[in-house]
Image: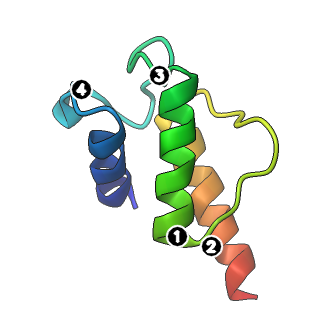
Amino acid sequence: MYKELREILKRVMPGINPDNYTPESRLVEDLKFDSLAFMAMASEFEATYGVEFEGPIPFKTVQDVMDFVQEQKRLGEK
């Protein structure tokens, strides 16, 4: 999952070297995400994993994103 997420983040934020962040990296403070980056990330996840985002995206860290997608995938398997 982390490897897949890194590829998505690389597409969303091409100026950020994926070797410079970890699951604990904060999206806004460390990776400089703005509202457009959050929207692009949501679109990538919807296309890649078929998950849907409703309302504001509450992620603070890369790990938050991974947890959300894994939970959505798990719920989709039921």
Quadrant where the N terminus sits is bottom left
Query: Which residue in the protein does label 1 denote?
Result: 49
Q: Which of marks 3 and 1 precedes in the sequence? A: 3
Element under disc 2:
helix
Q: Are marks 2 and 1 in contact (CB under 8 Å)?
A: yes
Most foreground residue, 17 or 70: 17
Tell me residue 70's x, y (percent).
59, 64
Q: Are marks 4 and 3 in contact (CB under 8 Å)?
A: no
Which amino acid, by three-letter code, is at mark 4? Ile
Which amino acid, by three-letter code, is at mark 1? Tyr
Q: Are marks 4 and 2 in contact (CB under 8 Å)?
A: no
Q: Quadrant of residue 24?
A: top left
Q: Which of marks 1 and 2 precedes in the sequence? A: 1
Which amino acid, by three-letter code, is at mark 3? Phe
Spatial CA distance of label 2 from label 1 is: 7 Å
Element under disc 3:
loop
Spatial CA distance of label 4 from label 2 is: 27 Å
